[in-house]
Image: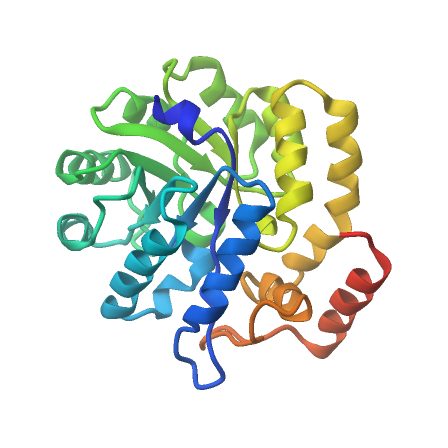
Amino acid sequence: MKLRDQLAGTGVALITPFKEDLSVDYEALEKLVNYIIANGVEYLVSLGTTGETPTLQHDEKIKIINFTYELVNDRVPVVVGIGGNNTQEVIQNLNTYPLQKAVAVLSASPYYNKPSQEGIFQHYKAIAAASPKPILLYNVPGRTGSNITAETTLRLARENNIMGIKEASGNIIQCMHILQKRPQDFLVVSGDDHLTLPLIACGMDGVISVAANCFPKDFSAMVRYCLTGDFNEAKELHYKCLEGNDLLFAENNPAGVKAFLYEMGLIQNVVRLPLVVLSAAVHQKVKDYLKNSNV
């Protein structure tokens, strides 16, 4: 199966649950993964930014990847996040992390360095040449400080082993230019939960979602309705989830989604510094939303 077909639909950017002592909570991760898969998502993304990867140690990352493979047991595809602003270190990780069971690698554009478009191109060209798995670009200017332009994305789409992009620029016009001119097998998915419906209407293949951690049934159903052109059904679920999506990103990610999952009894409400849990006022809104909504 082509990667574009394999990763159409809803992928979930998994959180990393922690115990009160800040160690990784593997029992909670098992509970969460089984809950998400049982509610119909198409694939999982391990070690994305939502997984608090900047605060995970190298050995923790390796253990999380292997644990996720074992737990998923081929029920759905797994994508692994490996990115950074040191190109040589990314290449080293691509060659040392356990990627045998991954279908692709999601790699965020280099952050903080603020490379030029040529620098972004050369970074991805170098890691794609070194990677044992297909590379998915990840454009998230709000976190990285730089944008991958449509022109650079389309240029990279012609390179060997670069097979798609998670587009989280929030710029729908930029997204449309990519969709209009992308190669046939090049996967384009949304990185913005709020914009998933209109972006699929423009031609995207799906989403890599934060919201689908806690709303996997409704969110993945909404995406499937979009992909089959049933936008009346899709809009009902889109607006059903809208207030919840607002709360997920009211302060920071993944503090928002962790608050939801805590109130749903799936994890402890713990993040690692420099992140902090939601303020009491916003957390109360999460509790009220879950009490009053049918999610």
Q: How many marks?
A: 0
Is any part of residue 150 visible from this angle?
Answer: no
Q: Nearer the viewer, residue 86 or 292?
A: 292
Tell whether 187 sits left or right of 213: left
Is any part of residue 294 visible from this angle?
Answer: yes
Q: Nearer the viewer, residue 151 or 208?
A: 208
Picture colour scheme: rainbow
| Residue at the spot 20% in from the left edge and 24% down from the top edge | 160
Image location of residue 22, percent across then percent down:
43, 81
Image location of residue 200, percent across then percent down:
59, 26
| Residue at the spot 23% in from the left edge and 69% down from the top edge | 59
Residue at the farthest bottom position: 21
| Residue at the spot 37% in from the left edge and 44% down from the top edge | 78
Quarter-wise, where is residue 260 in the image?
bottom right
Please tell me whether residue 232 is drawn above or below residue 95 in the rendered image: above
Image location of residue 87, percent across then percent down:
18, 49
Tell whether 214 sits left or right of 95: right
Quarter-wise, where is residue 112 in the image?
bottom left
Please tell me whether residue 188 is drawn above or below residue 30 in the rendered image: above
Tell whether 158 sits left or right of 282: left
| Residue at the spot 59% in from the left edge and 48% down from the top edge | 212
Tell whether 66 sits left or right of 8: left
Image location of residue 194, percent across then percent down:
65, 42
The N terminus lies in quadrant? top left
Quarter-wise, where is residue 281 in the image?
bottom right
Q: Nearer the viewer, residue 262 or 165?
A: 262
